[in-house]
C-alpha cells in the first residue's frame, strides 16, 4: 500500500473533470424545480456506493446481467438524452412524484455516477494505487455533496430568467453529450466527424 499525495491529486483532478458536478448544476436545478427538494446526502451516498461497487466488482457485476460496459454507457446516454429533451422542450418525461423524485435517477445515476466516470474510475486502477484512488474519489464525493447542498444559492443568484436561459443552453449541451456517448459506444462513425 503506497500512499501518495501526487497520485491522490492526479486521480482527484481526473475524476473531478469527468464527474463535472459544476457543469451539472443547471440540470440539478431543473430537476429540483420539478421534483422539489433534492436529497444531497442521499444522491451523494448512492453515487458513492455505485462507484465503489464498480471499482471493486465492475465487470463481474455487469457480467451477472450479461451486460458489457458499452451497453451500460448506451443506457446512460439514453437517460441523459431524455433529460436534455425535457430541458429544451420544457416537457416532463420523468415522473418526479415520489419524495426526492430525481435524487437517485437521474442525479446519482447517470449525472454523478455515469458511464464515463465509472469507466474512468476503472481505468485509474491501471495507473494508481487503490488507496490513492479511493481517497481521491472520497474527496470528489465531499465536493459533490457541498455543491448539491448549495443549489439554492445558485438558484437565488441566477434568478428565474437566468435559470430559464441556462436550462435551454445546457439542455442542448446535454443532448450533444448523449449523442457522443451513444456514438462512441455503438461504433457509429459520422461522415463529417473530426
Image (tube, helix red, strand yellow):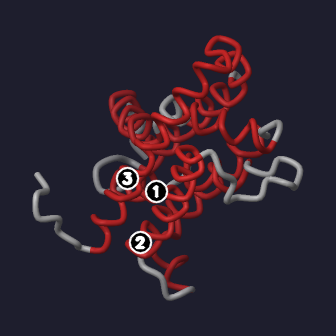
What residue sits right under mark 1 in the picture?
A: 118
The disc at residue 69 is 2
Left or right of 161: which side holds 102? right
Residue hosting label 3: 120
User: How many residues crowd around disc 1 within 10 Å: few (fewer than 14), some, or many (20 or more)?
Assistant: many
Horizontally, is 12 left or right of 123 in the view? right
Determine which quarter of the picture holds residue 122: bottom left
Does the CB distance between marks 3 and 1 fall below 8 Å?
yes
Tag 2 secondary structure: helix
Q: Of marks 2 and 1, which one's residue comes earlier in the chain?
A: 2
What SS does tag 1 mark? helix
The crowding category of the residue bearing disc 2, from other C-alpha atoms within 10 Å (few below 14, some 14 to 19, many at least 20), is some
Question: Residue at left 38%, top 72%?
Answer: 70
Q: CA distance from mark 3 to mark 1?
A: 5 Å
Question: In the rendered structure, are the residues bearing label 2 and label 1 in contact, judged by CB atoms less than 8 Å apart?
Answer: yes
Relative image position of residue 102 (x, y in whole percent): 73, 50
- The residue at 86%/54% (across/down) is 97
Image vertical order of residue 110 relative to residue 20, above or below: below
Q: Quadrant of residue 9?
A: top left
Task: Depth check: give the residue in front, 137 or 98.
Answer: 98
Q: Residue at x 61, y 15 (%)?
A: 158
- Spatial CA distance of label 2 from label 1 is 9 Å
Q: Is residue 51 visible?
A: no
Image spot of residue 24 (x, y percent) = 53, 36
Give me the disc on residue 93: none
Compared across the picture, whether 125 is left or right of 30 comes to left
Amino acid at each position: 500500500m503506497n500512499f501518495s499525495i501526487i497520485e491522490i491529486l492526479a486521480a482527484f483532478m481526473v475524476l473531478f473533470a469527468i464527474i463535472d458536478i459544476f457543469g451539472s448544476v443547471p440540470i440539478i436545478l431543473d430537476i429540483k424545480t420539478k421534483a422539489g427538494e433534492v436529497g444531497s446526502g442521499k444522491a451523494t451516498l448512492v453515487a458513492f456506493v455505485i462507484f465503489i461497487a464498480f471499482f471493486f466488482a465492475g465487470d463481474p457485476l455487469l457480467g451477472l446481467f450479461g451486460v458489457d460496459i458499452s451497453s451500460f454507457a448506451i443506457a446512460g446516454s439514453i437517460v441523459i438524452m431524455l433529460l436534455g429533451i425535457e430541458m429544451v422542450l420544457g416537457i416532463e418525461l420523468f415522473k418526479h412524484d415520489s419524495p426526492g423524485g430525481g435524487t437517485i435517477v437521474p442525479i446519482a445515476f447517470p449525472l454523478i455516477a455515469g458511464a464515463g466516470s465509472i469507466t474512468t474510475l476503472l481505468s485509474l486502477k491501471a495507473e494508481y494505487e487503490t488507496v490513492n484512488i479511493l481517497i481521491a474519489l472520497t474527496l470528489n464525493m465531499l465536493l459533490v455533496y457541498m455543491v448539491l447542498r448549495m443549489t439554492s444559492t445558485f438558484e437565488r443568484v441566477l434568478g428565474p430568467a437566468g435559470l430559464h436561459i441556462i436550462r435551454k443552453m445546457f439542455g442542448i449541451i446535454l443532448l450533444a453529450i448523449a449523442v457522443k456517448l451513444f456514438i462512441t459506444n455503438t461504433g457509429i462513425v459520422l461522415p463529417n466527424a473530426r
